[in-house]
Image (tube, rainbow, N blue to C red):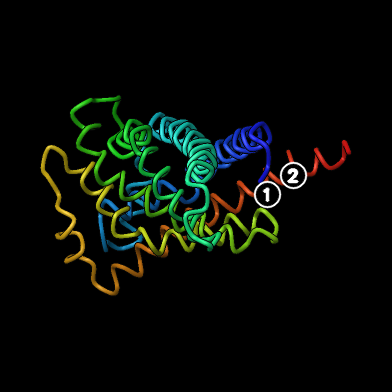
Amino acid sequence: MASRAAEEKEAFNKAYARAMSSSITWFITEYPKLITQQNGAKPLAETFAIYRNTSIKNHLRGSMTAAAQRGSSTALMFYGQYYIITAMNKPTEYEAINAGLAGFLSGGVSSFVHSAFEPMKIRHEGFKFNVYKKAIVPMFWRHGLFDAAFFAMNTFLKDYSYPTQFAVSALAASCVNLPHDLWKTQLIKALPVRVKFVDVLRSLTVSEYSKQMLAKCADLGMNWGMTGLLYQTLFVARDNDKQ
């Protein structure tokens, strides 16, 4: 396993790459995904109308918040997973299972940070503590499941390029945590009305599930693929040139 200093540097560089990626993909895929999650199976034209009528101020707020949240998310993911998997000291003989367990724990802990940012993107408003504390439970499951699947898959793909590792791992994780991601978005949007997880599950028809999955996979596949490309280009290739 790499040294502590190397792991910390790697986590910071991946976070930096994802922050840059997220500031761009907000406009292309993340905001359309959030609109789709909030409004369900409405025609594409209605999604486009909501996007078009959003003020540039709210778009810029969303872009900056996405960069801050997803950048900090990546730092927490990789820092947290490294420290937890080291502390766990190989609880099983399977590397992917160990990576997934550590990812679930680190993702759950990171939800306390994400819950401060996510309402800003969804509700287009500043921080409110009453919204923050009610967002923590769905955010815990959303990030715990995502990080567990992401790191397990990333372990299988460790010999591939970073764009491939990150994009495929994000797509796999998206399939695992989609219902909790929808619950998170709909609950935050509807507050102070409480949205139950079971109600979100009941509303998921095959058509709706397919539409939501397409929006989510497009967002995170592009976002993480671009993150891997930026990380490999800006940091890995540069370090290799120095050697």
- Extreme-bottom residue of the structure: 206
Residue 16 place in picture, x, y as percent: 60, 34
Task: State the residue position of label 1.
Answer: 229
Instruction: Name which residue lies at 37% across and 36% down.
Output: 114
Pointer 2 and pointer 1: residues touching (CB < 8 Å)? yes
Instruction: Name which residue lies at 38% across and 64% down.
Output: 213
Residue 180 visible in rendering: yes
Task: State the residue position of label 2.
Answer: 233
Say which quadrant the C terminus sits in.
Answer: top right
Instruction: Name which residue lies at 42% across and 59% down.
Output: 174
Question: Hey, which quadrant is residue 166 in on the image?
Answer: bottom right
Horizontally, is 66 left or right of 224 in the view?
left
Question: Label 2 sits on what residue type?
Answer: Thr
Residue 23 visible in rendering: no
Residue 132 place in picture, x, y as percent: 25, 31
Query: 10 Å neighbourhood of mark 1: few (<14), some, or many (≥20)?
Result: many
Query: 10 Å neighbourhood of mark 2: few (<14), some, or many (≥20)?
Result: some
Horizontally, is 182 left or right of 73 in the view?
left
Residue 226 place in picture, x, y as percent: 61, 49
The secondary element bearing badge 2 is classed as helix
Question: Hey, which quadrant is residue 190 in on the image?
Answer: top left
The secondary element bearing badge 1 is classed as helix
Question: Label 1 sits on what residue type?
Answer: Leu
Residue 235 place in picture, x, y as percent: 73, 39
Question: Hey, which quadrant is residue 12 in on the image?
Answer: top right
Instruction: Name which residue lies at 53% across and 37% down.
Output: 79
- State the residue in front, 45 or 179: 179
In the figure, 197 relative to 239: above or below?
below
Horizontally, is 93 left or right of 1 in the view?
left
Q: What's the distance in space between the residues labelled 2 and 1, CA to CA?
A: 6 Å
